[in-house]
Image (tube, rainbow, N blue to C red):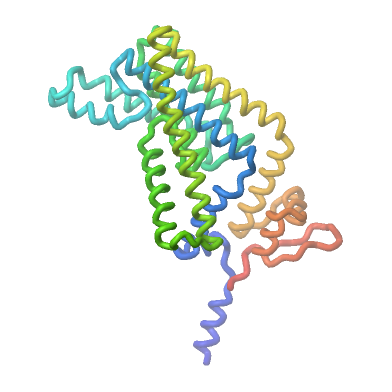
Amino acid sequence: MVQQQLIEEEEEQPVTFAEAIQNSAIRHVLLDQLQISEALSPSMMETFGIHLVGIVLSIAAGACNAIAFAKFQYYVSHVSGSATAIGLRDEDLQVGPVAPPVWLVVYFIVGASICGLIVHSNGMRLGQARYEVVLFLVAGMELVCWYHDLAYPEWLAAAMGVQNAMITQWSTAVLRTTHMTGTATDLGSSFGRIIMRFVRLRCQLEDEDWNQHVADRKKLVLMICLLLSFILGGFVGSAGYNSYKIHSLLIPAGLTIMLGFVHIAYCILKREEVKEEVVAETAFRRQISGKGPDDVEQQQFVQGNSAAAQFIRQISGQQQDPSGGVAGFPARLPGS
């Protein structure tokens, strides 16, 4: 009897949301739902923005890669070729010294590290993360190479490292714009899942299956857009190099600068919305860690009528204060 009572008391101990997701079953379901939600929830404007950024950066990277190869016979937008060339050149199976591909790999990693110093968190943080600084830095590195008559391909590799790290953090490793291996892989796997889903269910999709289908379909379309854009960038860079030689590098640099100014405009136009989003994220982050809101602004948000505020109150076991005041929050979430 005493043992059973102790077990019941132990089961009733509250747990935080962060502790709950340590369970692999809960975590897997949440990850699946998050992926579906990310595909289904964005507005038309957000979807357009994601496609625009991916397409423009893919064109810019494809052009930069084509220009670099036309000038140096090196690919700078990805590491695989340079990493393989190190071994080939060391064994005299490829013409040229070992040092150039080594430095291309090193500079790419350095560029990615610099991006990590500027953008600290994963996920889309439009208006919060300093994406315009990163984009201007990418263009600046390309312009350094242009200023020196395309004498230093390492600067282009560093620029591609910065760009790839930014889009990786921005999309939580979903998008790639400087190389298309992952893009082609996601394209093929999404297409395969779509076919298998229709075959397995004989074209009779329920709501959950249909949501997964829509998510895969949207991802398939995005991956196709990125791949075609990178190919288009290769044509643009090749034609530009034939016509303008070293000045062709101004094309990808100009595209990247344009996106930087677009993000600055977004920060100005969406200043209030971004501020509210920061408050919401901070309040939710503190709540799932078991701390609760720590200032009046966060508490006022939690007492609001938004879907996020209602969800935070539900997982914390609180009710909205009918007087409009600020209700206290427990330190931990009630266990089930």
Camera-nearest residue between 179 and 142: 179
Residue 197 percent location from the top left of the image: 43, 57
Q: Residue at x 57, y 21 (%)?
A: 258
Is 155 rendered above or below residue 105?
A: above
Task: Judge whether residue 253 can be spotted in this image.
Answer: yes
Q: Quadrant of the C terminus?
A: bottom right
Q: Tell me, yes or no, if residue 114 can be seen here.
A: no
| Residue 325 percent coordinates (x, y) | 83, 58
Q: Is residue 249 left or right of residue 41?
A: left
Q: Vertical placement of 194 versus 74: above or below?
A: below
Left or right placement of residue 43 versus residue 4 in this view: right
Please give left or right for residue 65 compared with residue 41 in the image: left
Residue at figure coordinates x 41%, y 42% from the top left: 187
Q: Position of residue 293 (x, y in %)?
A: 69, 54
Is 68 situated above or below 17?
Answer: above
Quarter holding residue 303: bottom right
- Which residue is at a point 22% across and 27% down the rendered structure image? 86
